[in-house]
Amino acid sequence: MKVLVKNIGILTGLGHEGKLCLCGAEMNELNTIEDAYLYVIDGRFESYGPMQELPKLPADVEVVDAEGGAVLPSWCDSHTHIVFASSREHEFVDKIKGLSYEEIARNGGGILNSADRLHETSEDELYRQAMRRVDEVIRKGTGCVEIKSGYGLNTEDELKMLRVIRRIRETTKLKVVATFLGAHAVSRGYIGRQSEYVGLVINEMIPAVGQEKLADFVDVFCDKGFFTTEETARILEAAAAYGMRPKIHAEELASSGGVAVGVKYGALSVDHLESMTEETIETLKGSSTMPTALPGTSFFLNMPFALGRKIIDAGLPLVLASDYNPGSTPSGDMKFIVSLGCIKMRLMPAEAINAATLNGACAMGLSEEYGSITKGKVANFFITEPIPSIDFVPYAYTTPIVRRAFLQGEEYK
Ligand code: NIG
Ligand code: FE
């Protein structure tokens, strides 16, 4: 199938051939052409250029008129918990009253509350609820997404979540990668017996997930009050035997060594970093681990923002992701995440957009095929309303600018 998108006001996120991610000053390079066309063959980008240079195209091409709107590569959201049962707005109200995230978790709320709801929800119902959120984020321009388990907290329910993630991958054109997060919290039945719970994760959950090949990555909530660096190391080692590379929750609640253990075990990314320090930056230097900021979480929980500006100024790559989940970020709106990156972390719009596209793809191991408008990559992109400049994208922080979303070269309807 051949698709020509014509009359593009601003075509951006181009090129970066051969680059798996952008580091430091490169992050401010967002290659752009005005008054452009984009040509897609069989779901992959074929060519692009100025409208005056539009080549003669075959008769069987489907023509899409962008009517002066901008075209961007789809958002690549490398950290979500989009599969969950029921919202948790009552905890939102508790937070307004002054309870902290840790206090809510200690009172048996938080993740354990979601695990209770998930346990009583069937796989079909879980899929149905997740698909409503998937539909929403696709319409907002997301084209690649990482989804974690971690609200099961026993083998059967973790497998149920991962099968729902697999079903989302099989039934949509969205690119989906799956992460096993059995060590998200100690389940109710194991409270006071954390080391036994870690044993369950290592000896029962990981082999079951590995045998069914349900996860690409492994995650651990390595933080104060959750799992220690030593427990994290053991879990990462066990998962490595099944080919699951780490992508871990680190330095959200405290600067407690999560980044160092992630780097040591070759994590693809270390995510959150709200409590990171300058030392975290030193630990990351020279590693292949992508620092991932989740500014929606900082916003929703009134926490400090990761030091995104300093990460880029240190020459490192930065990733922005949503963390879409029922407790700390009930939103998968990547445009808003990009705005928060600019407003709260002092990122330039180009840096924030690259952090949420090419670098997001890299943090899922997908950047050879996704994350930019580059010849040969999968044609995931969106067309916006006509906008005056790319800076308008983060500036107009609640304006729903996405008009048409395309996955694998096909319009999502
Ligand atoms: O990434 N920090 C750990 N886990 C999730 C929150 C989970 C929840 O509250 O349901 C997060 O923010
Ligand atoms: Fe998370």
Image (cartoon, helix red, strand yellow):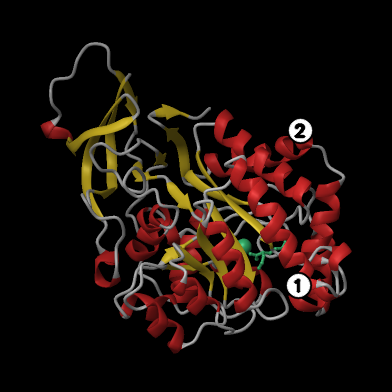
Q: How would you rate the neighbour count of disc 2 (Cα within 10 Å): few for under 14, some for 14-19, many for 20 or more?
A: few
> Residue 345 occupies which quadrant of the picture?
bottom left
The relative height of residue 290 versus residue 149 in the rendered view (above or below) is below
Q: Quadrant of ligand 2?
A: bottom right
Residue located 80% across and 60% down the image: 89
Instruction: Identify residue type, mark 2.
Output: Asp
Q: How would you rate the neighbour count of disc 1 (Cα within 10 Å): few for under 14, some for 14-19, many for 20 or more?
A: some
- Is 180 positioned to the left or the right of 138 in the image? right
> Residue 74 occupies which quadrant of the picture?
top left
Residue located 43% across and 33% down the image: 406
Task: Identify the mark at residue 124; answer none if there is no mark.
Answer: 2
User: Where does the image place residue 2, in percent across and percent down from the top left?
Assistant: 29, 21
Q: Nearer the observer, disc 1 or disc 2?
A: 1
Q: Quadrant of the N terminus?
A: top left
The relative height of residue 66 versus residue 288 in the rendered view (above or below) is above
Residue receiving disc 1: 195
Residue located 57% across and 42% down the image: 213
